[in-house]
Amino acid sequence: EEEPAAELLEKLQHPSAEVREYACASISKLLQQKHVIPAFLQRDVVRCLGPLLMDHSLAVRETAAGALRNLSACGGFEVCDDMVTKDIMTPLVALLKECSTEIDANQLSPKKCRETNKNYIEDIANEAINLLWNVCECNNTAVSIFNKEGCLESVLHYMKKFSTNVDLAISVANCLQAVTEDNPDLLSSFNASAQQILETVMLCPESTMKHILLRTLIAGTVWNIKDTIPPGSLGSMVNAILKIFSESLAIDAGETIIHMNEAEKNRLKLAAEAETEENISDVIDNNSLIEDDDMEEIPKGKVRRENDISDLLPSDKWELKEVTALLTAQQTALEIIVNMCCSEELSDDEWEELSSSDESDLFMENSYNEGNGLLMSPLCLSDEVNSAFLNNLIPKKILEKTAFPNSVALDICMHNPSWKPLIKKLNTVQCRALTCLHSILLVSDVDCLGGASALQSLAEHLSKLVFSKMELPTDTEFLEAITSALRALLQTMASKNISQCMTPEQLLALCEAGIHSSNVGVRVNVVSILGISGSVLAKGQDTAETLKMIGKFLLEVAMKESSLVVAGEALDALFDVFADGKEAEKAAVQIKLLPALKEFQPVFKLRMRKEGKGQYSTDQLCVLDNVKMNLRRFIAYHETLGKSPT
């Protein structure tokens, strides 16, 4: 690994553009392997490749940008930080601005290879934008430089090519969504002209999956810059965003995979038949090579790359790219809705305008699930919004996305190596839908959720996701998402005394599986779920035996759990379950709850002193302090009442 790195980096200084391009392309390919990256970093690959972004040869610029893009994508946060430290932003910003100027001139006199119809300026811009996106997503200094250097104007200029180059537009949209997130310093740059560009893209009528992804990403950008939107236009803006998300989520990804896979088979079959009828010539027409006064000529006879080495999907896999774009769009839409649920930016007046506007009807169309009558706002952003906006319906589409992926589609992906990565994307969309459902449940009241029967139907649906298979799920991401949704749902049901559909045996089985997860969030969720369900059972009749099992489980977690956060949650759950009630009192006596807690109290205090500082956030420590105080009060209260033997 070290020898090729040294040899290739040396070739970057070669006087021949063909050799420099070969070296960049080879480095680009190698950098997709994470274990190779350290060897290149040790030899200062960033400073070696950086100047080549402004090379005289267009081909070298493109391959250098592609190599740096792969380095930023595969290297992670630390590598991106190192790239910014080594001043990659200086040549990158210069390249972006020059390409922005060239892209207009290029329309009049395109720098294209006529054989492949390759547009060098736009392809260079695409690589550069992806590099910019990666470093800005990982590094705040890069975002500050983006602001200071006025990069927004150049980036938006590329977006104008969306009608002829959707791939470039998608790259720009990804970058825009990254740089506009939590970046108030950039908001003043979004003038009327900039907003007009975004609006034009949002309204584009093309129905391909790539265009759906493009509109979804731009909708996310518009949400990020909502503070620049005049109050009177805010309602129509949000409804436009929701309409785009609704369009994306309405598409059945499983059926799309089946359809696109069949289309790929037919295309390849026709291509194979056509190839047998053609005489393939290896002669390359010299006229197909570009020339430019300011740029080095691409060496005659040089075989061009048919696809960018930094791209994960070859250019001929258009069906696969379409499905990938759809799944990315759906994931993005769900993630933005989750962010919307946490927003507290909008006033009641603004949301009254929104909820009464005509566009809200468009979003609600076909969103009512007649099977379970679920009523919910499509946003449910905050308590403030709930008062004005919860007369709407939850999109049926979000619930549909929480189901397991289509088994036929999964089988296609499993038996097709190039389609296999879609399995992870399908599962990710399901998890994001569950997270979205969790967020909506947190901010909605029971009436707007459709009442008791709707919540019970939802509980049955979530239970089936957990218990429908022979074995309980073990995937960490899915477990965290499903337990978060269940926790929020059961808490809502418990607060309104709505009977729960999960049996104590099912709950204990879920908790037994979840408590062994390596993910702290999963463990916190299952402990909380058990506490919620136990507190409901404590109000019933003849539940002492079940409460004993719950109490023993929670005690063991509190005493043996390695994470103080989970141990604290287990104690909180115990307080809820055994707060009151004859059945709870009977169970507490039988499991010797009070003596156990009295014995554990000093241990918990000691753990907090030893482990608290440095390992946990301020918020977590605040919660743990409350648990410690509640533990003291719980013991004192029950000692006073004499509810447990000494």
Image: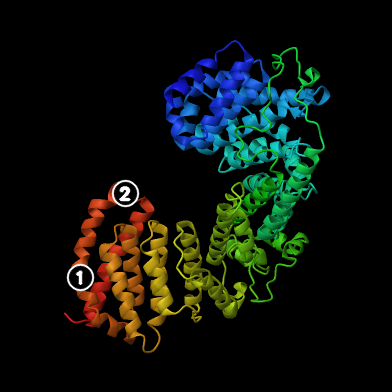
**x then y, percent, for residue 232:** 73, 52
Which residue is labeled 2 in the image?
615
Which residue is labeled 1 in the image?
598
Identify which residue, 280 or 205, lies in the foreground: 280
Q: Which mark is residue 505?
A: none
Question: SS class of the residue under badge 1?
Answer: helix
Look at the image and tell me whether residue 242 can be seen: no
**x then y, percent, for residue 304:** 69, 25
Spatial CA distance of label 2 from label 1 is 26 Å
Q: Amino acid at mark 1?
A: Lys
Q: Amino acid at mark 2?
A: Gln
Q: Residues within 10 Å of mark 1 (few under 14, many from 20)?
A: some
Q: Residues within 10 Å of mark 2 (few under 14, many from 20)?
A: few
What residue is shown at x 30% (from left), y 46% (from top)? 614
Tell me which corner region of the image, top left, top right, bottom left or bottom right, holds residue 437. Answer: bottom right
Tell me which corner region of the image, top left, top right, bottom left or bottom right, holds residue 109. Answer: top right
Q: Is residue 269 above or below residue 129?
A: below
What residue is shown at x 29% (from left), y 57% (from top)? 562
Look at the image and tell me whether residue 74 can be seen: yes
Q: Is residue 421 above or below residue 131?
A: below
Q: Which quadrant is the N terminus positioned in?
A: top left
**x then y, percent, for residue 531:** 38, 72
**x then y, percent, for residue 112:** 77, 24
Q: Of all residues shown, which one is farthest toward the top?
A: 15
Q: Is residue 240 left or right of residue 547?
A: right
